[in-house]
Amino acid sequence: MARLNVNPTRMVLTSLKKRLKVAVKGHKMLKDKRDELMKRFLELARENKKVRAQVDDQLANVYSNFVIASAVMSSEVLDEALMYPKQGVSIEVGKKNVMSVNVPVFDFTTTTDDASNIYPYGFANTSGELDSAIKNLSEIFPSLLKLAALEKEVQLLAAEIEKTRRRVNALEYVMIPQFQETIKYIQMKLDENERGNQTRLMKVKDMMVQEAILEKVENNKIAIEEYKREHLN
């Protein structure tokens, strides 16, 4: 792992140690977030599968009734019966926060006070299968909205999981090893400099001791010469 290109000083070493501590803490938090997102994603995926199966079954029933109705009714009568819808809906889009991800929440209101008032035609010239198809389609609408919200939430969580995974990998395999390698390098350089300083100090100390010894020897020689001159003369 390539180390960072920095000056091997104690100030840089202290700064890198702080950054490494923050990176390790952030790595743990992101891993926890990723695990929690995965747990939530799997729960949503199972719920989404269940709701989709229910919606598919209901839609199949609706389509079956429409096919039968179109078979027993003329196309002109069918088109006229469905030309002017009697009921309408207004969809409201909200949002909720799931692990720092804003996901949509769908709700709806009907345009008339009576939500069951859904048939835009009289019952004299239409078949019972058309009535069943419209009734089932009205009943399935909340499930369709729920399914749409679930699938969008699953997509958003999947994108967030991937983004969090990349960040975790970047910290785990790039940033943290770089910090550790650089700290190790700086520590080695500082230790090497410290040993060099100690070696130089020892040499200086040896030189000072040697000079002191030579000075003492020289002083002793001078003292001996003076003693000889005073007592021998």
Image (cartoon, rainbow, N blue to C red):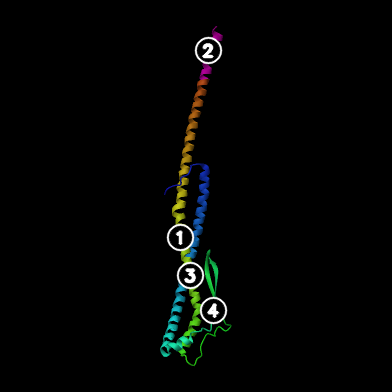
Q: Residue 225 shows which numbered tag?
A: 2
- Which of pointers 3 and 2 lies earlier in the amino acid sequence? 3
From mark 4 to mark 2, how far is it between C-alphas?
A: 124 Å
- On the image, numbered disc 1 is attached to which residue? 165
Q: How far separated are the C-alphas under marks 4 and 3?
A: 21 Å
- Mark 4 vs mark 2: give the one in front: 4
Q: Residue at x 53, y 49 (%)?
A: 18
- Compare marks 4 and 2 and give the one earlier in the sequence: 4
**Which residue position is annotated with label 3?**
152
Q: CA distance from mark 3 to mark 2?
A: 106 Å
User: What amino acid does circle 1 point to?
Assistant: Arg
Disc on the earlier residue, 2 or 1: 1
Q: Residue furthest bottom?
A: 124
Label 1 SS: helix
CA neighbours of label 1 inside 10 A, class few (<14), some (14 to 19), many (20+):
some
Q: Is residue 162 above or below residue 216?
A: below
Based on the picture, tell me whether residue 213 belongs to the magenta stretch.
Answer: no
